[in-house]
Image (cartoon, rainbow, N blue to C red):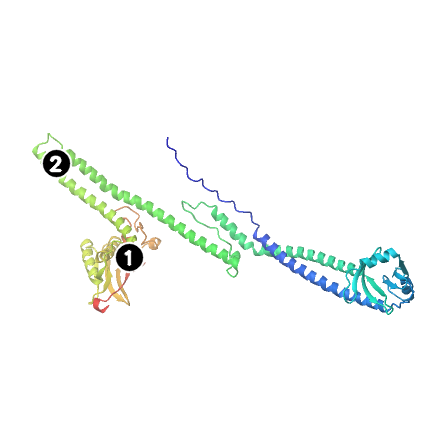
Amino acid sequence: MSSVSEGPAPQRRPRAAHRWSLQTRLIIAVVSLVALILVAIGFATGTILRSIMIENLDAQVTSASERVHLAPTGTAADVLNEGRQEVGTLLIIQNLSGFTGAYVGEDEAAVALSDDEVRGVISSIRTVDRLGWGDATVEGAGDYRVRVQGTVSGGTFAVGMPTSELTSTIAQILTTVTLLTLGGLFVLASVIAVVIQQALKPLRVVADTAARVASQPLDSGDVSITERVPDAEADASDEIGRVGAALNTLLDHVDTSLAARQRNEERMRAFVADASHELRTPLAAIRGYSELSLRSLQRSDATVDQRLAATEQSEQGLERIQAASLRMTTLVEDLLLLARLDEGKELVYGAVDLSRIAVDAVADAQVAGRGHAWHVEVGEDPVVVAGDGARLHQVAANLLTNARVHTPAGTQVTATVALDGGDAVLRVHDDGPGIDPTIADELFERFSRADSSRARQTGGTGLGLSIAKAIVSAHHGTITVDSRPGSTTFEVRLPARPADPASA
């Protein structure tokens, strides 16, 4: 029992990670940037302000140390009571009697420190720089900025001022800056949210319009896209407005394409009905005449006269069968020619005299349309183009046939060939009733018919002018029509070439 190897299981596409909206990302980006700037400004401001306040505090400490007059045996409390020191001034003295310390209390009286407190202050004095400045902590009094100096007798003393005011001021400033920053960021986020919401409003309108269009069934039927971005939201003066304008242009193109598709489908259905009618009639004739001929020939009890009549009837039937097959062959060959022209095939290039083609085509048209007045106007010099003579003759014949079929008897038809700059121009003019304006824009489309009937005399299959346009386009030329009551002119322009190849 053979086993069938299974291929690798199809991999599931990873689900896209949830993304914040553009508005949210813009707000976060702006607020974060501003917050970073404000924090940097606040940090720089606090650092500079603290440096300034420390300098002021150092000046106060220096001033206090200059007011200290030491005695050989006096205590720190005696010295502070003798001078007029500010509240909070700290004094530590080392003299002959050892270390003493005191600070000025709230009542401006000196408060002596115990030996343990003095030793605690001395031990808490952190690294003193070369100028004698340092920081100390007094239990129950807080942190101090101190300056250590020497005396003439070889002792030392330290004078300090409390840093509580500096710390309090810095804390107040930082608190104020923090609150103002948070409040400012909140206001900024609110303002930015409103501004961005208004700025992105056209983009939301564009997205809503696209969503509504996407929800419409566009696969079949007569579809018309009426949704458009409002003009107020499609102002091309800004980037988002250009998106709206571009979407409107795209919707216009899609709407036009859908309308063209619907027209092509309708023409195709009409052509299928016409082709079915054109093919059904000859096929029915072929079948009928073939069955009739077979029955006539298969009669075994027929007399000689009946057999002769059957033979004559069979010959007529074969002639009708041949005529019907020729009509079907013409239709199929026209379709095949269009397909090959679309593929760039079916053309055999050479030097073609457009004047001779016009003369021959008018001569042929005179035989088929004796009720019309035919004229041809060509110059003495040949008008030579590079192309397929047979196909260009088909173009001229189609235009002349079109003039004959769609104009009443007595209409004057004129074929003109001339040079216009570097172009060879073939014009077919008639003074008939003109072309219906409702089909003028679709005249050269395939399956387009000036007469909606299926009569072979007038209706046709709607391929004649489309074949003419395909042949002219394959020759890198153009075909146009100018029609009004009493004057209709078809004009074919092809690149001209010199009559003498040696002069090219």
> Pointer 2: residues within 10 angstroms few (<14), some, or many (20+)?
many
Q: How many marks?
A: 2
Q: Is residue 260 visible?
A: yes
User: Quadrant location of residue 473?
Assistant: bottom left
Disc 1 element: helix
Kindly identify which residue carries mark 1.
Answer: 474
Relative to residue 212, is residue 49 drawn left or right? Answer: right
Taking depth in this image into account, of 451 and 66 the one nearest to the observer is 66
Q: Position of residue 346 (x, y in %)?
A: 25, 53
- Residue type at mark 2 is Ala
Q: Position of residue 288 (x, y in %)?
A: 20, 37
Residue 310: assigned label? 2
Q: Is residue 463 visible?
A: no
Which quarter shows the N terminus? top left
Q: Is residue 214 above or below residue 357?
A: above
Which quarter shows the C terminus? bottom left
- Residue type at mark 1 is Ala
